[in-house]
Image (tube, rainbow, N blue to C red):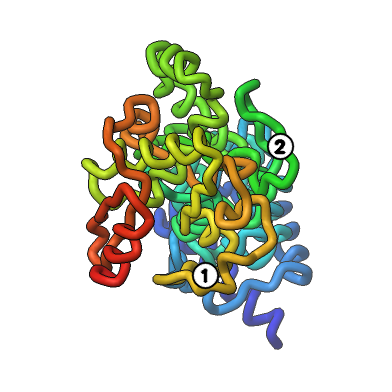
Amino acid sequence: MRELLRMHELRETLRAVYRGKGTPLQKKIVFGVAGLSIVLLLLAFVSISPSEKTSVRGGGEAQIYFTVRPGMTASEIGKELHAQGVIDSELKFWWMAKLNGFENKVKSGTFALSKGMTPRDALETLVYGNTVVVRFTIPEGFGVRDIARRLDDEGLVNADEFIERAKYYRPYDYVEDHEGVRYAAEGFLFPDTYEINGSFDVNRILEMMAENFDRRLTPEMRERAKEMNLSIYELATLASIVEKEAYHEEDRPIIAQIFLKRLKLGMPLQADPTVQYLLDTPKEDLLLRDTKIASPYNTYQNTGLPPGPIANPGTASLTAVLHPADTDYLYFVADRNGNNYYATTYEEHLALVDRVR
């Protein structure tokens, strides 16, 4: 009985096509007796649910950016669409492409799709729809995990895949390989607004952001780092700490100067953000036990710089390290509003802590 109903629905669809009605995809189908027989045979294998007949596009789900790479087959496309939850069956997608002669007519590029689409809607979008320009913004101070979550939330990449790739991504010689580093790419993914017109994946996004960092690091900045006896890696590491410590623009060169002075004196940096980097959820105030976490990133327990950057700094923080302020300050503390207070002695610092905290 169910199969008879399906056949009846198919005949109604065919009549609509011959009358000039139906979707653009249906209009492309040229049905003969042989074609009708094939379709009737396929109905035994490919069941079309009522929700698919209504063709509710996207089901109200979040947008997903899907990239069709040149040379992809309908089978490969269907498999990836299914894996991302766009369609419920790669087999249905393949048969629709096969029967309509669209196996080689899907356009390359990036499309805005949704979870829960019917195979027909997804195929129509890839054949008739327009590709999109993808835009995303990464703020200064975002770490690898922050970037991964944002890109995942916007439907661009899988967060776990991004994080895993970032662990080993070293596109330039100055991205040094240090023991204990969490993410090789950390610190070298420039925070900015990006536009992608064409295909992309995790590797392409990492490449774009790393190229941007390399481009923003001007010859003058590189030369200044040499004069200060700082490697590019050390510059990015220190700038990442300044980025996380400074809430206001005017504080950056002062904080940079304090940290540079402490490095020269052999004092621990005692930078809270290096400990926050180790926590799954950042805290408003670190506890004493947090400062005792055993890790090379813990600048309360270790002197010198951590093994690598703890975030991705912007130009202002990089410039602050290269051109620090000239002060006698050695200590600072921030109040609840992010305003910093500076001291030259430890006694003055303790008095400030009591006052502003």
10 Å neighbourhood of mark 1: few (<14), some, or many (≥20)?
few
Task: Check residue 281 in the rendering and tell me which mark sits there, or answer none.
Answer: 1
* Residue name at image x 45 percent, y 62 percent: 16
Residue 64 in sight here: no
* Residue name at image x 60 percent, y 55 percent: 298
Q: Amino acid at mark 1?
A: Thr
* Residue name at image x 62 percent, y 29 percent: 175
CA distance separating discs 1 and 2 = 25 Å
In the rendered image, the quadrant that contains the C terminus is bottom left
Is residue 191 toward the left or the right of residue 205 in the image? left
* Residue name at image x 43 percent, y 21 percent: 217
Circle 1 or circle 2, nearest the eye: 2
Residue 94 position, x and y percent, is: 69, 52
Secondary structure, mark 1, is: loop
Is residue 205 toward the left or the right of residue 6 in the image? left
Q: Nearer the viewer, residue 59 or 35?
A: 59
Q: Check disc 2 and report the residue beneath it.
A: 178
Task: Check residue 337 in the rendering and tell me which mark sits there, or answer none.
Answer: none
Could you tell me if the residues under marks 1 and 2 are in contact, i.e. CB atoms within 8 Å? no
Q: Amino acid at mark 2?
A: His
Considering only order in the chain, which callout, 2 or 1, is on the residue closer to the N terminus?
A: 2
Q: Nearer the viewer, residue 276 or 31?
A: 276
| On screen, residue 10 above or below 134 | below
10 Å neighbourhood of mark 2: few (<14), some, or many (≥20)?
few
Residue 241 position, x and y percent, is: 45, 45
